[in-house]
Image (cartoon, rainbow, N blue to C red):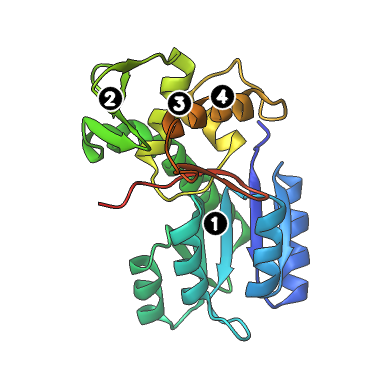
Amino acid sequence: MANSGCILVVDDDAALREMLAEYLGSHGFSVALAADGESMRVELERACPDVVLLDLRLPREDGLSLARYLRERYDVGIIMVTGSGEVIDRIVGLEVGADDYVAKPFDSRELLARIKSVMRRMYARPESTAVSATPEHVRVGRCRLDLQGHRLLGPANEEVPITAMEFELLKVFVEHPGKALSRDRLLTLTQNKEWDPFDRSIDIRVARLRRKLEAGTDDSGVIRTVRGVGYMFVPAAE
């Protein structure tokens, strides 16, 4: 069965980049390529990948710094590529947020298996951890989201009308605070098969949610647009 998903390869070895693009492409993945941190950011602006394959030794910015940058801003899988003897760097890489690592020289089949494993864990993660990690009531703009009661409550504790689809979308946002989520990722997390990531359905619902969350306030950043990626929920400062 064909795979699906986007892989961003960040490595300063041009020959290795091209080899991985051909190999992963032949297994059904869309592959983007970057030689360093600067070109990585350019590719992220174009589209948010599912998994970033990140070389540890890069010019100017090292892989550990870039892994930290990715983890703070994007909901993506990160696989570090290290030298065979860099045990400490592997440990640090995992500590800063990498999901896995592979040592050079690596077998392409092993790399493919690790990519599939990281993607499986990413898509399974919300079902197993989201409820326990999120409070029952979450402040969103001028409102509070009641996760148990499936309600949106206004400043005076009044119930704000919200559709089932809007509730599911807002629930996904509050379970991933500060994470840029692509439209395709939002579809996966809401498990709503009727939406199309290429139409305007998510954009329309986000616009409706913004009006409800920001009505009568100066707050314009509850759900922010992340250019080239999608949307991000920004929690209110305590």
Among the two numbered marks 2 and 3 on one chain, the one whose residue lies closer to the N terminus? 2
Among the two numbered marks 1 and 2 on one chain, the one whose residue lies closer to the N terminus? 1
Q: How far apart in space, not on screen, are marks 4 and 2 (Cα)?
A: 18 Å
Task: Give the secondary structure at mark 1.
Answer: helix
Task: Give the secondary structure at mark 4.
Answer: helix
Q: How far apart in space, not on screen, are marks 2 and 3 (Cα)?
A: 17 Å
Q: Looking at the picture, does residue 79 appear above or below residue 126?
A: below
Q: Amino acid at mark 2?
A: Leu
- Position of 125 with respect to 113 (left or right) is left
Q: Nearer the viewer, mark 1 or mark 2?
A: 2
The residue shown at (69%, 78%) is: 12
Q: Could you say which is closer to the camera, residue 172 or residue 34?
A: 172
- Residue count near mark 2 (Cα–Cα under 10 Å), binned few <14, some 14–19, many ≥20: some
Q: Nearer the viewer, mark 4 or mark 2?
A: 4
Among the two numbered marks 1 and 4 on one chain, the one whose residue lies closer to the N terminus? 1
Task: Give the secondary structure at mark 2.
Answer: loop
Q: How far apart in space, not on screen, are marks 1 and 4 (Cα)?
A: 41 Å
Q: Is residue 101 visible?
A: yes
The answer to whether marks 1 and 4 mark residues whose Cβ atoms lie closer than 8 Å is no
The answer to whether marks 4 and 3 mark residues whose Cβ atoms lie closer than 8 Å is no
Q: Which residue is mark 1?
A: 110
Q: Which residue is mark 4?
A: 205
Q: Which residue is mark 2?
A: 147
Residue 139: image location, x then y, percent = 29, 37
Q: How far apart in space, not on screen, are marks 1 and 3 (Cα)?
A: 48 Å
Q: Could you say which is closer to the camera, residue 95 or residue 201?
A: 201
Q: Amino acid at mark 4?
A: Arg
Q: Amino acid at mark 1?
A: Glu
Q: How far apart in space, not on screen, are marks 4 and 3 (Cα)?
A: 11 Å
Q: Looking at the picture, does residue 199 appear above or below residue 115?
A: above
Q: Which residue is mark 3?
A: 212
